[in-house]
Image: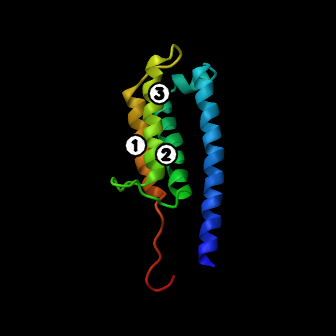
């Protein structure tokens, strides 16, 4: 039955990730439409903190939702790898938007969040004692 529990757990993480992706899509859409609150833009470093936490959260959920599957030949966790890749593409795409601005600082905050929260999302190994 532990295998069934694992399947249920992964399914729950996938549902959580799907909801989180919707939330990120809404936030991104608001940013492109210039609909984010001005406090986000005017409070020093709040933008970077939000990049770190929001993309980090996606990385954590993605690692759990993919049950720690690895990218072939690279060996990195697939969930955080995909989140980092998509975050990089989205940040670079901002160069071509009249309403957004590419930022190396934002990209660094995104990727740092992906790494830190991806590491926090790693599966916990049970001890040999059967705990």
Left or right relative to 108: residue 54: right
Say which residue label 2 marks: 56
Farthest-out residue, left = 73
Q: Is residue 130 above or below residue 98?
A: below
Q: Quadrant of the N terminus?
A: bottom right
Asked if disc 2 and disc 1 are in contact, CB closer than 8 Å, the reply is yes
Residue sitting nearer the eye, 24 or 2: 2
Q: Position of residue 124 (x, y in %)?
A: 47, 68
Q: Position of residue 57 (x, y in %)?
A: 53, 47
Q: Is residue 88 above or below residue 17?
A: above
Residue 45 showing in the rendered view: no
Say which residue label 1 marks: 112
Residue 92 showing in the rendered view: yes
Say which residue label 3 marks: 44
Q: CA distance from mark 1 to mark 3?
A: 18 Å
Category of crowding for the residue at label 1, using alpha-carbon neighbours closer than 10 angstroms: few (below 14), some (14–19), many (at least 20): some
Left or right relative to 30: residue 42: left
């Amino acid at each position: 039955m532990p295998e069934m529990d694992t399947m249920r757990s992964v399914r729950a993480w996938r549902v959580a990730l799907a909801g989180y992706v919707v939330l990120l899509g809404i936030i991104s859409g608001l940013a492109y439409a210039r609909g984010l609150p001005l406090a986000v833009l005017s409070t020093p470093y709040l933008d970077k903190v939000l990049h770190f936490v929001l993309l980090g959260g996606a990385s954590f959920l993605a690692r759990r939702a993919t049950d720690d599957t690895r990218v072939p030949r690279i060996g990195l966790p697939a969930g955080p790898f995909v989140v980092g890749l998509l975050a990089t593409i989205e940040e670079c795409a901002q160069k071509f938007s009249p309403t957004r601005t590419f930022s190396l600082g934002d990209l660094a905050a995104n990727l740092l969040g992906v790494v830190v929260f991806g590491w926090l999302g790693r599966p916990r190994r049970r001890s040999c004692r059967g705990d």
